[in-house]
Amino acid sequence: MQSGTAAAGDHALSSGGAANGAFADRVIAWQRLHGRHDLPWQNTRDPYRIWLSEIMLQQTQVAAVIGYYQRFLDRFPDLQALATGAADEVMRLWSGLGYYSRARNLHRAAGIIVDECKGEFPATQADLMRLPGIGRSTAAAVAAFAFGQRAAILDGNVKRVFARYFGIEGYPGLPAVEAVLWERAEALLPKRGLEPYTQGLMDLGATLCTRTRPRCPACPLAADCVAQVHGRTAELPHKRPRKPLPRRSCVMLVMQYRGQVLLERRPPAGIWGGLLCLPQADDLAAARNLAETLGADWHGHTALGEIEHGFTHYHLTIRPVSLSQPASSAKNVAREPRYSWMPLLQALDAGLPSPVRKLLLALEKTLNKSLECRLSNGRPL
């Protein structure tokens, strides 16, 4: 840390409980007047709904989550429904939201609560952290909002608020920097008003102390925020150390037979785990071998437009290839447990990775245009 910035950042804590209380009081007062109060998962003590929202909000913005949250609750309105629901249905409803391990862990955790906890939702941060997919901050949020437990949160928005307010140097994802942020989070917890304080920190980071163009004049912490006072809001928090993402590529087989498309169930772990996907190979040679194994005629293949897709740790170039499937081999493929033929419209409603959905949507449009052309020319179907 820079010496001047560290001193400014330490002042709020070194002044003792009074300074800490003033920080919390400002956050609480602001949240009650200006914070968010009508999100679908607010105004409830139901730990299931709060937990579901917190898992969906991990690395995902509120606007993207609301529709998924409501559709998920329509299908799985309570813990028992989720625990006994089919994994395929869970993945279908999560399709497009990304970070699919969240959905798999959510389903696993529901089963654990029902089977091992007799349906009683764990009420403490420590017990919640024993469930798959629940880390320290998520457990604290559920414990605070559902059970009134005194526990500190530190999600991405809160890290940004603290890094700017205290002038904390370094990338917040580094263990040493994160440890300092957790120290601040624990020290600032108020004795009263925990829920509006916790929600207020989230709201500040999401609506005022944003990554770009923060609305500092409206912030209740602006008067002694190190980043604001010293003109460093664009600099803090420090960005992730830049290093080029590795690039990978794959070939996906778009295999059709009588209005159906061939899908393959991905393994439970790994990228797109548990989702339905198009058969995939590393390169064209491997794709040809796979196509021939599945009984398709590689000589009749058609290359489709490439799709670029970004993951957290690498960038993927997808090269789709369209193939028709002879009737004789289509029956053989159906015997393979991981493969299934599915009508195109039904496939679009299944749990698919977003680039696969994009491919199949383009295929549907092409087929519809072909059908319209045949009908307009008076040709039989």
Image (spheres, helix red, strand yellow):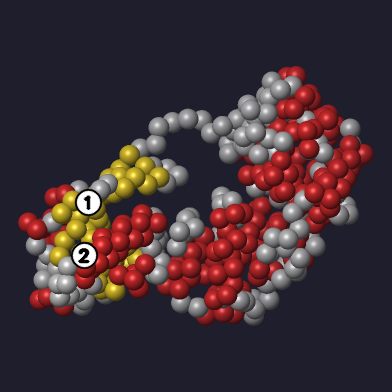
Q: Residue beneath label 2, please?
A: 373
In which image quadrant can residue 351 be found? bottom left
Rendered location of residue 283, percent (x, y): 20, 48
Q: Amino acid at mark 1?
A: Leu
Task: Give the left or right position of residue 36, taking residue 100 as reference.
Answer: right
Task: Give the left or right position of residue 210, taking residue 112 as reference.
Answer: right
SS state under label 2: helix
User: Measuring 65% from the left and 47% from the top, which residue is drawn there?
Assistant: 155
Quadrant containing the C terminus is bottom left
Quadrant containing the N terminus is top right
Rendered location of residue 116, percent (x, y): 60, 76
| Pick the front one: 209 or 376 | 376
Task: Give the left or right position of residue 133, taking residue 215 as reference.
Answer: left
| Pick the front one: 143 or 103 | 103
Which of the marked residues, 2 or 1, is nearer the chain's N terminus? 1
Q: Amino acid at mark 2?
A: Cys
In which image quadrant can residue 6 be found? top right
Determine the residue located farthest toward the right in the rendered image: 18
User: Measuring 39% from the left and 59% from the top, which residue is drawn there?
Assistant: 353
Query: How busy is the neighbourhood of tag 2: few (under 14 within 10 Å), some, or many (20 plus)?
Result: few
Instruction: Kindly identify which numbered label has been placed on residue 304.
Output: 1
SS state under label 1: loop
| Pick the front one: 228 or 3 | 228
User: Measuring 48% from the left and 68% from the top, which residue is drawn there?
Assistant: 93
Rendered location of residue 88, percent (x, y): 42, 72
Determine the CA span between mark 2 and mark 1: 21 Å
